[in-house]
Amino acid sequence: MRFEEFTTRFVQQTGKKEGAISPVMVNSASFGYGNSEMGEGIFDGSVKKPLYARVGNPTSAQLEQILASMDGGVGAVAASSGMGATAMATLSLLRAGDEIISVGGLFGGTYSYFSETLERFGIKTRFFDVDAFDAIDEAVNTATKIIFLESVGNPNMRLPDIKRIAGIADRHGVALIVDNTITPLSIAPLALGADIVVYSTTKIITGNASALGGAVVFRAIAEGDDKFKTPRYRDVHPFIQKMGSMALVANAKKRALRDFGMSANGFGSYLTMLGLETLPLRLDRIVSSVERVAGELDAKGFKVNHPSLAHHPHHERYRSQFANGCGTLLTLDFGSKEAAFEFLNRSKLVTITANIGDSRTLGLHMASTIYRDFDEPTREFLGITPGLVRISIGLESPEAILDDFVHAANFQK
Ligand SMILES: *Cc1c(COP(=O)(O)O)cnc(C)c1O
């Protein structure tokens, strides 16, 4: 249903009915105000015109509108990268002494951002498995500002019960941020109770490695009671007074974008919109290919990790809560680093790279690359075994992918 709806909406929102059809690309770093009164109006917010590219760009603004509509948010802010988006969403809410509860996942960059970088600034993060509901509930205290959740464990492929974790966040009045990079359109975090969604648009949203980018989508502040109106979020209160329902967007722009500068650029946002037009088609095809490839490799004796397989611990959750699939990833375990390298080197189809969500099928040995600097207990928590290869299925024919994988793994027999 969602794929169908957005197949129409994205192309209609991106194109223009008159004049240039592809999005207008504005790449200027600064903008002339014409006269001083206009300059004053732009700075006090009464005139809606570009101020300076660090705090907003017209091409990125169009992308922001489309992403906000995709997730039913009140607004979005584009970022220079997915890590920029995560930094924006979190830094706009945090101060020294605060705590984060991180659930599931976790993307390597986010893990080191929480465990090393934010730690240096006096912010503590505790990490939990997706099913540790009681422990998550008990871990919330007065210092907790954020529960952070990844929609799909990358690369452990564990699936969270987003609604249930949103329930815990709501009960304690704590903000839930969902990294939905792997499942745009497939999962609608705001509808499931999240407050903020972050994306790396570098991945499936753009889909062809042409642009690094990210985005944060915010829900509206409610008219009556709202968790952001409680003393826990007192730093947000001035923005609620001034901006009402748009407060989280304004807060992120002033408290993160303006001062840290993780801003998107016009050219990157342009390329991202071109990718977005075809996101529903690409994702729909890849999700069906992933299930097919996972099923057939599993039947052939490969050690496959994907929740579409009946023996996966979250198979039931996959069926009931991930009706549109869980993105482009599956993992294969070859038992040792040597066997994993052999498979990847013998494959003619896999592009070996750290990216995911591309038109091409991508693969990477986890322990020797993204997770090389992590100690053994951390790797174990994140599901990184010595022979683990992460695969991101692309647009190729699933038969071609299967043939290639079977051939590449032939040395094992
Ligand atoms: C890639 C990725 C990020 C970081 O995005 P960049 O655009 O590389 O900065 C964050 N979260 C997830 C789940 C990712 O896959």
Image (cartoon, rainbow, N blue to C red):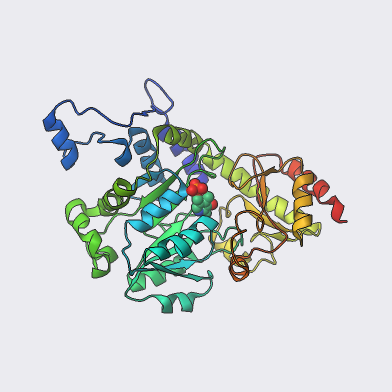
Residue at the image position 51 percent from the left and 39 percent from the top: 206
Residue at the image position 71 percent from the left and 51 percent from the top: 292
The quarter of the rendered structure image containing the C terminus is: bottom right
Is residue 24 left or right of 127 when viewed as pictured? left
Quadrant position of residue 165: bottom left
Residue 318 position (above or below residue 245): below
Is residue 204 left or right of 141 when viewed as pictured? right
User: Residue at the top extreme?
Assistant: 19
Give the x, y percent position of residue 136. 45, 74
Q: Nearer the viewer, residue 398 or 61?
A: 61
Give the x, y percent position of residue 81. 45, 45
Total tally of numbered discs in the picture = 0
Residue 31 position (above or below residue 302): above
Q: Nearer the viewer, residue 223 or 212?
A: 212
Is residue 197 left or right of 30 when viewed as pictured? right
User: Residue at the left extreme?
Assistant: 37
User: Residue at the front extreme?
Assistant: 120
Whether residue 12 can be seen here = no
Quadrant position of residue 366: bottom right
User: Residue at the right extreme?
Assistant: 413
Give the x, y percent position of residue 30. 29, 31
Residue 37 position (above or below residue 383): above
Give the x, y percent position of residue 105. 54, 62
Whether residue 200 can be seen here = yes
Residue 101 position (above or below residue 222): below
